[in-house]
Each structure stands twice: as structure tokens, then as C-alpha cells.
């Protein structure tokens, strides 16, 4: 029923939900994978585009989720840049992520222009980046 997304994640039918909407609401398909853990929820999203088969969309989204799940990172790439501002406003903190994106770099640069914090990202191994937000005196 769910094809490659079910096979890629080894999920049971009761863990999957497929919703169809009428074709007038959008040009393609989308896939959202939500992982709810004790202290964080990660969402992986794939959006259909012209010329992209649904199976390819599913494989790409599942591959991104599997990279996160196979790492020891606390958060994924897209949540990492969203955590920076709340941590800076709170005065500091740290977390690990699967990647330090260019968006996270520019977000950190903007935050450091307006708040008295230093934001440093250090690659700890091939699949983990440790991000530290430290208040400046």
C-alpha cells in the first residue's frame, strides 16, 4: 500500500497514514515523516515537483530520515538553525546535529550581530556537528 516508504523504514501499516486530496489543491505530492522522541520531534518533508516520480520523492525523504536516525545527533539539519535564536535568547546551550547548513551559518551570523553570544559549530565526526551557543560577558 505505501511502497518504498514502508520498505525503507521497516514500518508497520498502523504506523503509516496516507491522505489523498482532490487534484485542485496542488500540483503534486508531499511526504512527511514525523519522529516523536521524549525531548524532540523531527519532521522530514519531501515535496513533489514536475518530473519527479513519487517513488523518487519517497526514497529521497526516507534517505534523509535514515541519515538522521543512524547518527547520534539530537536534531536534524533544519531544526538546528531554528534552535539558535531561542538558545541565544536563553543565554546559551549546546546540541548535536547531523549537518551545519549554509542557512544555519547565515542565521548564526545574524544572531551574533544582535545578541551578545558566540555560536560555534564543530564537526565531531563524519556524521555529527556539535553546536555551542555561549553568552559573551
Image (cartoon, rainbow, N blue to C red):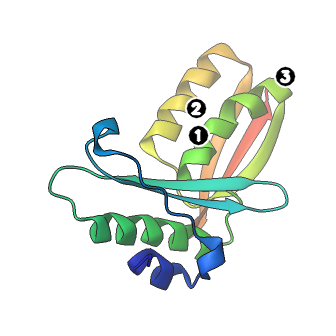
Where does label 1 land, which residue?
Answer: 81
Where does label 3 land, which residue?
Answer: 137
Q: Is residue 59 above or below residue 29?
A: below
Q: Is residue 113 above or below residue 85?
A: above
Q: Secondary structure at mark 3?
A: loop
Q: Secondary structure at mark 1?
A: helix
Residue at (81%, 42%) from the top-left corner?
93
Labelled pair 2, 1 in contact (Cβ < 8 Å): yes
The x and y percentages for residue 109 are: 54, 27
The x and y percentages for residue 40 are: 76, 54
Q: CA distance from mark 2 to mark 1?
A: 8 Å
Observer-side mark, 1 or 3, equals 1
Q: Is residue 7 above or below residue 78?
A: below
Mark number displayed over residue 100: none
Observer-side mark, 2 or 1, equals 1
Left or right: where 136 falls relative to 100: right
Residue at (54%, 80%) from the top-left corner?
9
Q: Secondary structure at mark 2?
A: helix
Residue at (44%, 72%) from the top-left corner?
63
Q: CA distance from mark 2 to mark 3?
A: 18 Å
The x and y percentages for residue 111 are: 62, 23
Observer-side mark, 2 or 3, equals 2
Q: Name which of mark 1 and mark 3 comes first in the sequence.
A: 1
Whether residue 126 is visible here, answered yes or no, is: no
Where does label 2 land, which residue?
Answer: 108
Q: CA distance from mark 1 to mark 3?
A: 24 Å
Residue at (50%, 38%) from the top-left corner?
105
Amino acid at each position: 500500500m505505501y511502497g518504498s516508504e514502508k520498505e525503507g523504514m521497516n514500518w508497520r501499516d498502523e504506523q503509516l497514514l496516507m491522505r489523498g486530496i482532490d487534484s485542485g489543491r496542488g500540483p503534486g505530492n508531499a511526504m512527511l515523516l514525523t519522529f516523536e522522541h521524549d525531548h524532540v520531534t523531527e519532521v522530514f518533508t519531501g515535496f513533489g515537483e514536475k518530473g519527479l516520480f513519487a517513488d523518487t520523492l519517497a526514497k529521497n525523504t526516507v534517505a534523509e530520515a535514515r541519515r538522521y536516525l543512524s547518527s547520534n545527533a539530537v536534531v536534524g539539519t533544519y531544526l538546528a538553525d531554528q534552535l539558535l535564536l531561542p538558545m541565544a535568547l536563553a543565554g546559551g546551550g549546546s546540541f548535536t546535529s547531523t549537518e551545519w547548513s549554509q542557512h544555519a551559518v547565515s542565521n548564526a551570523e545574524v544572531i551574533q550581530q544582535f545578541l551578545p553570544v558566540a555560536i560555534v559549530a564543530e564537526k565531531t565526526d563524519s556524521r555529527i556537528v556539535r553546536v555551542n551557543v555561549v553568552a559573551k560577558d
